[in-house]
Amino acid sequence: MEDGGPVLMAVVLFVLLTPGLLCQISGKGRVVEFGNMQTSGISILVHTVIYFGLITIFLIAIGVHIYSG
């Protein structure tokens, strides 16, 4: 059996936390901007830290597993 949980969680979180796609934390004009598709270095850093924290919680602390087959 193959464990697809880590791959699925990583892909979903990557898509949701891409800066400027859905929201951007530490935007140019406001703290949070929605759908502006413009990124800055600070925004990329903030989204990277949030991604690392969430992926660590989901994969190590909670232990998400999805088995196929």
Image: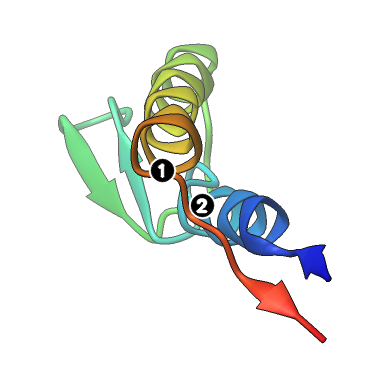
Judged from the image, the secondary structure of the residue bearing numbered disc 1 is helix
Q: Is residue 20 above or below residue 52?
A: below
Residue 27 percent across, percent down from the top left: 31, 31
The residue shown at (62%, 49%) is 10
Residue at which label 2 appears: 13
Measure the C-alpha gap from mark 1 to mark 2: 10 Å
Residue 36 percent across, percent down from the top left: 42, 54
Q: Quadrant of the N terminus?
A: bottom right
Residue 62 in which image quadrant: top left
Mark number displayed over residue 26 = none
Residue at which label 1 appears: 58
* Residue type pointed to by label 2: Leu
Mark 1 or mark 2, earlier in chain:
2
Left or right of residue 16: residue 26: left
Q: Is residue 4 above or below residue 68?
A: above
Residue 69 percent across, percent down from the top left: 82, 86
* Residue type pointed to by label 1: Phe
Judged from the image, the secondary structure of the residue bearing numbered disc 2 is helix
Left or right of residue 60: residue 10: right
